Image (cartoon, helix red, strand yellow):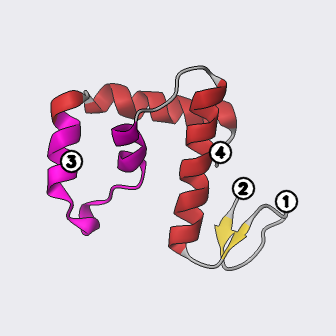
């Protein structure tokens, strides 16, 4: 498990920023997908970092045209659980 700013009991990674923590989680998810021989495409990887605050509405629209969100979310959840990402 990881936390921003201070270590926790299991001494997992410590990050100096939210961006650093997010990059770590994205990397772990992408790695797990590759290990399962089901790599994420470039757009799926970009969406792992997408937030409503970044207002990249075009990226979200492009994703929605090519992917079904519920399936993607289910897949990512499975990768997180299987890979013990968080």
Q: Position of residue 6 (x, y in %)?
A: 73, 78
Q: Which residues are magenta?
A: 42-64
- At 23% from the left edge and 39% from the top edge, which residue is drawn? 63
Q: Main secondary structure of the magenta part?
A: helix
As helix, strand or loop, the secondary structure at mark 2 comes to: loop
The answer to the question of whether label 2 and label 1 lie on touching residues, with beta carbons closer than 8 A, is: yes
The secondary structure type at the circle numbered 3 is helix
| Residue where numbered disc 4 is placed | 85
Q: Which residue is mark 2?
A: 1
Measure the alpha-carbon separation of dots 3 and 2: 29 Å
Disc 2 residue crowd, few under 14, some 14–19, many 20+, Cα 10 Å: few
Q: Which residue is mark 1?
A: 10
Tell which circle, 2 or 1, labels the residue nearer the N-terminal end: 2
Depth check, mark 4 against mark 3: the one in front is 3
Q: Which residue is mark 3?
A: 60
Q: What kind of element bears circle 1? A: loop
Question: Could you say which disc has been placed on residue 86 in the image?
Answer: none
Seen in the image, is 82 located left or right of residue 60? Answer: right
């Amino acid at each position: 498990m990881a936390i921003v700013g201070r270590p926790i009991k299991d001494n997992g990674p410590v990050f100096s920023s939210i961006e650093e923590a997010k990059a770590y989680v994205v990397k772990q998810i992408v790695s797990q997908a590759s290990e399962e021989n089901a790599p994420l495409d470039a757009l799926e990887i970009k969406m792992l970092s997408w937030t409503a605050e970044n207002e990249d509405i075009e990226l979200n629209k492009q994703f929605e045209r090519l992917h079904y969100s519920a399936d993607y979310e289910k897949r990512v959840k499975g990768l997180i659980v299987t890979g013990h990402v968080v």
